[in-house]
Image (tube, rainbow, N blue to C red):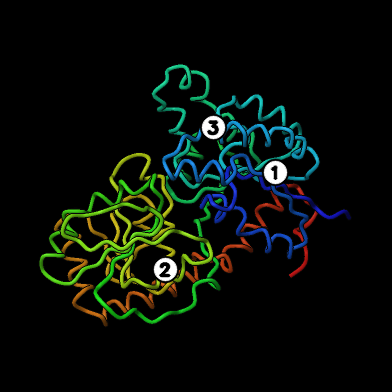
């Protein structure tokens, strides 16, 4: 029997968290299981750097797309294609199906990406692409989604088979680390594109800073500042992100209760918990599933809730330690690559129609 071949069609390179953590994270495990794995990426790191730094990025996107298009002969040379969101951004579903031919494909979503077209400000985009994702769902051998909100959307729009698989970490990269010395430090990790979510808890952080020591560690979003609150910034890097999170006592993930946010994965929370840190989060979307309120952290629905949760964690190191240990144990059981890879590999083997699940370790 020939070795089954799988193509990972990612939206971004390693700088893109969704590509890195939802597809590329599993490459080693897939190869160890007996699959031949290749990768093509649509938008490269140069595009994302321009986007994050607020520089003009359309030229970088066009250049990346131009390099990508000639590689689209690859899907037909594989037994299965695992696609992050879509194969051809801003082009109709019919063109994607033409590129794929008869090759079975898997779609992967970690956000409510369908809203990008269905609620686009351009009437032309809505008309041309508003039905793109439902059309792709109906033809997919498998749809992999990060949370229950996305699962409900996929099932309602005709997906034949859905696997709910959270965005996870490689736990080996998050060794247990003691809490840092110094003032009580709250961490937030993200990008300049998502730091507006952090702004939602500015009043709570200002109130806390007036009553005791408080430092905000912002990872990946330079320039974020709050009057009256000490803000420390650290540039994100793949090699350092776990160590950066370990510099804090608590990790936070505020979100508004809106459609896009309800479709987000709770990846920040999983990172904090993997590092053994207590968490505080808005009770929105996947946050509700990941955080066990009063066991691994707190869910805070309003300003008073955020103040109470963070004040209590600041005052009680033993509570932080208990939450941190419980959170790390939960990640090991449910939100680590080591736990999720076998389920994913079995689902991909079935989607590809392989005669048997790939062997190997």
Q: Residue furthest left?
A: 211
Per the model, the C-alpha gap separating discs 3 and 1 is 16 Å
Task: Find disc 1 in the rendering and name its residue.
Answer: 81
> Any mark on residue 46, and which?
none
Helix, strand or loop at label 2? It is: helix
Dots 2 and 1: beta carbons under 8 Å?
no
Residue 277 rendering spot, x and y as whole percentages? 36, 72
> Any mark on residue 133, and which?
3
Whether 148 is drawn above or below 235: the answer is: above
Per the model, the C-alpha gap separating discs 2 and 3 is 37 Å
User: Does residue 84 appear in this view?
Assistant: yes
Quadrant of res 183: bottom left
Residue 232 rendering spot, x and y as whole percentages? 31, 63
Specify the quadrant that holds the C terminus. Answer: bottom right
First-in-chain label (2 vs 3): 3
Quadrant of res 106: top right
Residue at 30% from the left image edge and 46% from the top image edge? 196
Q: Nearer the viewer, residue 189 or 304?
A: 189
Task: Find disc 2 in the rendering and name its residue.
Answer: 244
């Amino acid at each position: 029997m020939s070795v089954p071949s799988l193509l990972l069609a990612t939206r971004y390179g390693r700088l893109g968290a969704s590509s890195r953590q939802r597809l590329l994270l599993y490459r080693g495990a897939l190869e160890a299981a007996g699959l031949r794995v290749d990768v093509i990426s649509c938008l490269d790191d140069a595009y994302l750097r321009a986007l994050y730094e607020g520089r003009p990025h359309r030229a970088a996107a066009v250049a990346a797309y131009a390099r990508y298009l000639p590689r689209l002969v690859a899907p037909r040379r594989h037994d299965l294609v695992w696609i992050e969101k879509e194969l051809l951004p801003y082009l109709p579903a019919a063109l994607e199906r033409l590129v794929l031919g008869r090759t079975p494909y898997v779609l992967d979503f970690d956000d409510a990406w369908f809203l990008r077209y269905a609620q686009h400000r351009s009437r032309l985009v809505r008309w041309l692409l508003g039905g793109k994702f439902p059309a792709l769902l109906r033809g997919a051998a498998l749809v992999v989604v990060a949370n229950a909100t996305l699962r409900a959307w996929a099932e309602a729009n005709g997906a034949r088979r859905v696997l709910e698989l959270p965005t996870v970490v490689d736990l080996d990269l998050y060794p247990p680390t003691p809490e840092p010395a110094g003032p009580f430090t709250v961490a937030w990790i993200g990008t300049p594109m998502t730091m507006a979510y952090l702004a939602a808890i500015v009043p709570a952080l200002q109130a806390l800073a007036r009553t005791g020591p408080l430092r905000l560690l912002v990872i990946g979003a330079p320039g974020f500042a709050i009057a009256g609150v000490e803000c420390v910034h650290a540039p994100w890097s793949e090699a350092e992100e776990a160590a950066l999170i370990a510099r804090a006592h608590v990790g936070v993930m505020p979100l508004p209760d809106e459609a896009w946010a309800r479709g987000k994965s709770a990846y920040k929370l999983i990172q904090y918990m993997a590092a053994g840190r207590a968490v505080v989060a808005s009770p929105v979307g996947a946050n509700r599933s990941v955080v066990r309120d009063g066991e691994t952290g707190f869910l805070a629905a309003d300003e008073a809730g955020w103040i109470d949760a963070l004040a209590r964690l600041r005052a009680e190191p033993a509570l932080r330690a208990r939450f941190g240990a419980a959170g790390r144990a939960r990640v090991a059981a449910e939100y680590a690559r080591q736990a999720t890879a076998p389920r994913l590999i079995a689902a991909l083997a079935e989607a590809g129609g392989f005669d048997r699940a790939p062997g190997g370790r």
